[in-house]
Amino acid sequence: MDLTARARTIWGTPSRRLRIGWFRLLKTFRRNPNMTLGVVCVAIAVTMAVSAPLLADQSPTLIQTRQRLLPISSDHWFGTDHFGRDVFARTIYGSRISLTVGISVAVLALSAGTTIGLLTGYFSRVDAIAMRIIDGLMAIPGLLLAIALVALLGASLQNVVVALSVTATPGISRVVRSSVLTLRSQLYVDAATAMGASPARILLHHVLPNAWAPIIVLGTFIIPGVMLTEAGLSFLGAGTPPETPSWGNMIAEGRRFLRNAPWMITFPGIFLSLTVLGVNLIGDALRDLTDPKLRRRAEVDRGR
Amino acid sequence: MTTYILRRLAWAVPTALVVSLIIFSLLYITPGDPAAMMAGQDATPEEIETLRSGLKLDRPFHVRLGEFYWDLAHLDLGDSIRTGDPVIKLIASRLDVTLTLALLVEGVILGIGIPLGVIAAWRQNTWIDRGVMVVAVLGFSIPGFWLAFMAMWLFSLKLGVLPAAGYVPFGEGAWPFFERLILPTAVTGLIGMALLVRMTRGAMVELLREDFVRTARAKGLGERVVLFRHALKAAAPPIITVVGLGFAGLVTGLVITESVFALPGLGLLLASAIAARDYPVIQGFILLVSLVYVVVNLLVDISYAALDPRVRL
């Protein structure tokens, strides 16, 4: 069993086409409370990120040494940390880091992975070499590769995004490549070739539109993984610089004050978990929706 | 079977070479000059230069690459910048703690994860199934280190039933030894079993619709035999794949758990190496783990073929 088959074991068999009509989407929400819960969680995180200055009345970075390690009160809803900074404000602003990293990595890794997958799936000459490199990259556990890359590039938000994108790209390339391998032997691709279409036209107009569904589903599974890895990197000291109010950094800083100020760790962790949970639930629902085999089975189960 | 194993082996060797090449290249282009770092802050440029040629860092890529493989063949991963000890010695001295924890965690993952998945599939669409799936999706969503801190806060600081952190060798008493491993094992296992539970359930749900399951039931076999002897056996290949893939997650989980609970294993070695920017230790650790991962994948493929003759073709 090769790595492609393994990727499928995790992410499920990709279907051909993403057909989500509005009516079906509405029906999905009604039938699938998990999807609704996921959307609510993500909506909360997005609202926090977008309107952070409105929601938090205090600065996330203002140091007030007289107000160190204060418990939860009406002034400080989530208490204060060891520098007297407001944990509520930091938690709100932390959503920005998590979402920025999650979304930028998904966009970067999906673009790179799709490009590599299209090229390697279609041109067998580049395939052999590129696949060996991808096998090699996939043999390094993601967090460790990211640690090595951040150690190499230096700890900054930008470099964390780059490192995580490099980590996520190989898996996507593999899945896209496997779709392309099946798609390129389709009759309509032969027809286009016979009509003299260039490889670029075939890939962009005939293959890619039919490979969208697994790519989008993959994207929703990459975001939560990336958010957790980003927090893990920060926790190990190989992530965003310590002064950045990211949820991972907040948990890392709070560890020394677990006994006296457990709120420093509790709240960022709850919001990180809920955001990741939300994206995971949406990803599950999207996969069920785009997998016709699964959908049919779900309908059969309901009918019984 | 032998040809299959040889073919897989021929596949694994280039992968291992590519992995080591990637990791060597990372070491090669690392900006923070190791020589400058070792020489200290008030070293003159001449001193740094002498040290660099002493460390053989001034030679071209291909020469150093050749040496890297030569050293690797002699199990030499270089020396730690911080302590000067050989990296392989540092790793070997920490191996026992990590291996103990890894075995305990894997025991929890397999011993609880697989039965949970089977039961969820068996009672599909009941509250048992939903409960199990909720636990699984939470395992995907909760950061392990946060759960570890929460567990530590509850069980050690509030209830005071378990020690918060630290490690006592087995020689100094069995209970103090195990007592300190309960929380780390439980937390890492709980997070680590999520994927396995899901995959087991998914595979079993499909298999329980198959004719051979109906036949087994019609023969009058008990449910336990049908589930665990007949169906689970057929579900073994995807389960083994997930367990093999879980190796990466296991390493990640252990690194983070050891760092939280101050267990002096490989994870803590890595965490302190990151803090000190001790590149040889970081890269030696990653190289070793990745090479082991290649071997794990090889073993998964071989066991796959042993279980399913179709794969060998």
Image (spheres, coloured by chain):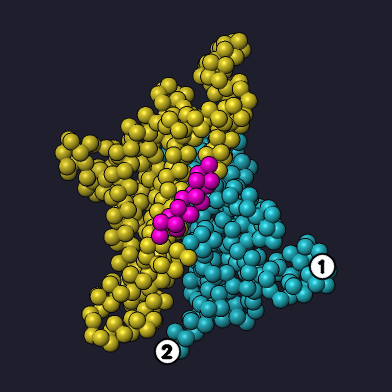
Chain colours: A cyan, B yellow
Task: Indicate which label's residue lies in the foreground, 2 or 1.
Answer: 1
Q: Which is more toward the observer, A229 or A194?
A: A194
Up/down of B122 relative to B43, above or below: below
The stretch of residues the image draws in magenta is B1-17
Q: Is residue A84 visible?
A: no
**Magenta-colored segment: predominant secondary structure:** helix
Is residue B224 found inside the magenta-colored segment of the image? no
Name the residue tied to disc 2: A304
Kind of element beneath mark 2 = loop
Residue at the extreme front of the image, as rendered: B3
Question: Do the residues under discs 2 and 1 have CB atoms within 8 angstroms?
Answer: no
Instruction: Give the spatial CA distance, label 2 vs label 1.
Output: 49 Å
Name the residue tied to disc 1: A197
Query: Looking at the picture, which amino acid does disc 1 mark?
Result: Ala
Up/down of A197 relative to A231, above or below: below
Give coordinates of residue B239: x percent, y percent: 39, 63
How packed mark 2 is, by other alpha carbons closer than 10 Å (few <14, some 14-19, many 20 or more), is few
Up/down of B120 relative to B56, above or below: below
